[in-house]
Amino acid sequence: MLEAAAKISGVVDNFLGIIRPITGVLVGLALAYFIWGITMFILNSSDEAKRTEAKTNMTWGIIALFVMVSLWGLANLVSNSLQLDTSKPTVDYVKP
């Protein structure tokens, strides 16, 4: 029974180890997309069609930020609930 729990814990820990860095990159991309929408909204303030497109970009940027931050929070909730080891792995380098 304990071996199965250890295997499941290891699989979840590996999965979260992959998801966390990817989520950080995606949050950065969503933030850049949102800022791009703000910039286009300001620069094209006289053109109504481009302003509407910029509003759409800002809306999707906010939605993407919400989803990514929620995913990040969910990953931390699962990690803390299962009491997984969240410390960074140490790598021993072989000296020549």
Image (spheres, rainbow, N blue to C red):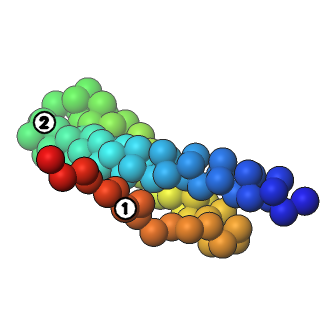
Say if residue 2 shows up in the picture: yes
- Secondary structure beneath label 2: loop
In front of the other: 80 or 32: 80
- Tell whether label 1 touches label 2 (CB within 8 Å): no
Which residue: 65% across, 53% down? 10
Which residue: 30% across, 31% down? 53
Say if residue 62 shows up in the picture: no
- Residue annotated with mark 2: 44
Which residue: 73% across, 51% down? 7
Which residue: 32% across, 57% down? 92
Picture quarter containing residue 84? bottom right
From the viewer's perspective, is 59 left or right of 32? right
User: Residue 43: x percent and y percent?
Assistant: 9, 40
Task: Point out the residue furthest to the front here.
Answer: 96
Q: Is residue 41 above or below residue 77?
A: above
Q: Amino acid at mark 1?
A: Thr
In front of the other: 52 or 24: 24
Task: Point out the residue furthest to the top here.
Answer: 49
Q: Residues within 10 Å of mark 2 (few under 14, many from 20)?
A: some
- Residue annotated with mark 1: 90
User: Residue 64: x percent and y percent?
Assistant: 44, 45
Q: Nearer the viewer, mark 2 or mark 1?
A: 1
In front of the other: 7 or 78: 7
